[in-house]
Amino acid sequence: MFEHLVETIRDQGQGVRAWETCALEAATAVGDKPDLAAPYFLLGAAAGRFVEMHFGEPLTSEKAKVQFDRFEAFALKLSNAFSGDDETQKLKALNEVATGLLNFGK
Amino acid sequence: MTISAFLDKALIAEIVANMLLEIEAVHFRSDKPYMFTSGLASPVYIDCRKLISYPRIRSTLMDFAASVILRDAGFEKFDAVAGGETAGIPFAAWIADRLSLPMQYVRKKPKGFGRDAQIEGDLKEGSRVLLVEDLTTDGGSKIKFCEALKRAGAEVTDTIAIFYYDIFPDTPAKLAAHGLKLHYLATWWDVLEVCEKKGHFDEQTLKEVRSFLTDPLTWSGNHGGVTEIAS
């Protein structure tokens, strides 16, 4: 469901520009898919946070991979929750990802 | 202030390379490569922002920048100087001061709406603006800042960076396609030459650096990065 955001980052080289494209894609999806607005908003916020923290800074390939893996995990968690009909699971996934954003990108 | 000393470009480049090494703005690391915004893996990183904290160095650098612009672009070529957010701003301010010109800065993203949404400061319609940034890798950010200035009514034909990576042969042509001529003070090749001459860093590190500078896409691909830069 949200794998396309992960693919955008992966396919465009995982540098800050790739994350920037992902953030824009997620922001657009918030408007295009209102039933999935909350997960797209959180994923967009994660990508945006990465860009803010690392634009113009000495980002190592190692750190880029760690954050990419974390983002992929967020996307998978939200995909699994929002693929079903259990609203409790959806809310749980949103809260877990939101909490994870607190130290995302560092 | 009048600029009247015009040093040889090679001498400027050597002095600037020495300055950057002296303040430890140059970082070489091949075991844990850096990643550029494009996804390129690199053993080199330069922090030109450190220059602002060294008054003697920055003053000399700004004299160099002004002299290069006056000599290579012209004495009456510009009506204003604009810095690209963020690191270009202080250098633009000092260059504007040296050239006795108005200054603006260009935001990375628009604030609000309207054709001036990315420009801070007063910009007159038709102004011939010199764009300033701290460094240039593939020219991508310069093109974006240039487009923002043009949308606001400026004419932009020249840009200057303190440091130019000079690792992608098509960068000048890419900038020229947007009507931009690049001026700069030093490149990685100048830094490498000083390092090799003065024994900065060990031989293996310098070998990796030279390998990267010679063929950055191959080096990047071999170290987990992209093998082509998206346009």
Image: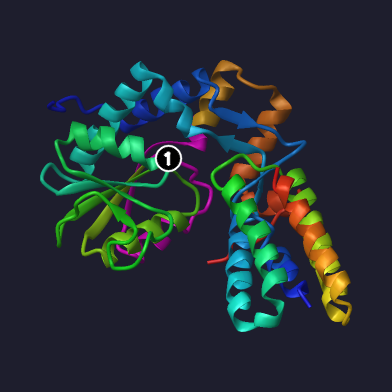
Question: Which residue sits at x=64%, y=64%?
Answer: A44
Question: Which residue sits at x=82%, y=76%?
Answer: A82
Report the front residue among A20 and B144: A20
- Secondary element at tag 1: loop
Residue extending farthest to the front is A88
Q: Quadrant of the C terminus of chain A?
A: top right
Percent position (x, y) of residue B91? Answer: 33, 35
Q: Chain of mark 1?
A: B
Q: Quadrant of the N terminus of chain A?
A: bottom right
Q: Which residues are magenta?
A: B162-190
Measured along the vertical axis of the image, is residue B82 above or below residue B67? below
Question: Which residue sits at x=21%, y=64%?
Answer: B153
Give the residue type that dot 1 points to: Ala
Percent position (x, y) of residue B170? Answer: 47, 59
Give the residue at mark 1: B87
Query: Could you tell whether B78 is left or right of A23 in the image?
Result: left
Quarter assignment of residue B230: bottom right
